[in-house]
Structures are given as structure tokens and as C-alpha cells.
Amino acid sequence: MKYESELIIKNFNDASYKYNLNAKIQKDCALHLAYLCSKLSIEKGIWADLGCGTGFLAEALEHLNPNQ
């Protein structure tokens, strides 16, 4: 069992550097969510990025809503 866990972690680490290059669906969804947010009346202040840890949503929110 330990070997399987180690293999999964190794495979994930080996492939993780390519994730941003291949995460087109995640980037598109983040941009769409950010676009929807930009159409809402959201008060200025602190925004919380409730994405999945990629940073795509935070980048898209900042791009479409600078200085929020």
C-alpha cells in the first residue's frame, strides 16, 4: 500500500509542472466566473478566491476587476 501512495505522489509531482500548460478547461471556467463576477454589484474591498488552488480565478478576477 505504501508503494502505491509513493508512486501516486511521484507521478503527480512528475506531471504537475505541465498542468498550467494543459488546463484549458480550468482557465476557461475561471475566466467565465470572473466575467460573471464583474457584472455583479460587488462592493469594493477584500474578495475571496474560491477556486481550486490553481490561481487561475484570482488572476482572472484581478484582470477583469483591477485593484479590487
Image: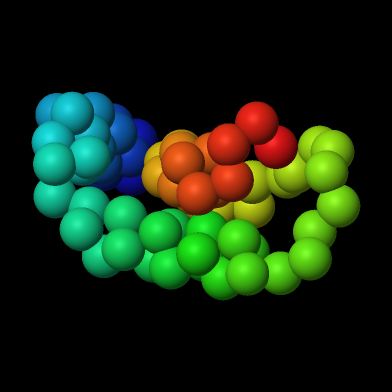
Q: Is residue 45 found left or right of 15 in the rendered image?
A: right
With 61 as the anchor, is 13 left or right in this view? left
The x and y percentages for residue 24 are 20, 58
Answer above or below: position of 63 versus 37: above
Residue pictured at 60% horizontal, 61% vertical: 38
Residue 17, position as x, y percentages in the image: 18, 28
The N terminus lies in quadrant:
top left
Q: Does residue 22 appear left or right of residue 16 in this picture?
A: left
Q: Does any portion of residue 20 appear in the rendered image?
A: yes
Q: Quadrant of the C terminus?
A: top right
In the rendered image, which quarter is residue 54 located in?
Answer: top left
Q: Which residue is pictured at 56% across the width and 71% down the height?
A: 36
Residue 67 image-quadrant placement: top right
Can the viewer see residue 58?
Answer: no
Residue 16 vs residue 21, the one in the foreground: 21
Figure quadrant of residue 27: bottom left
Determine the residue positioned at 43% across, 68% down. Answer: 32
Is 26 or 5 nearer to us in this picture?
26
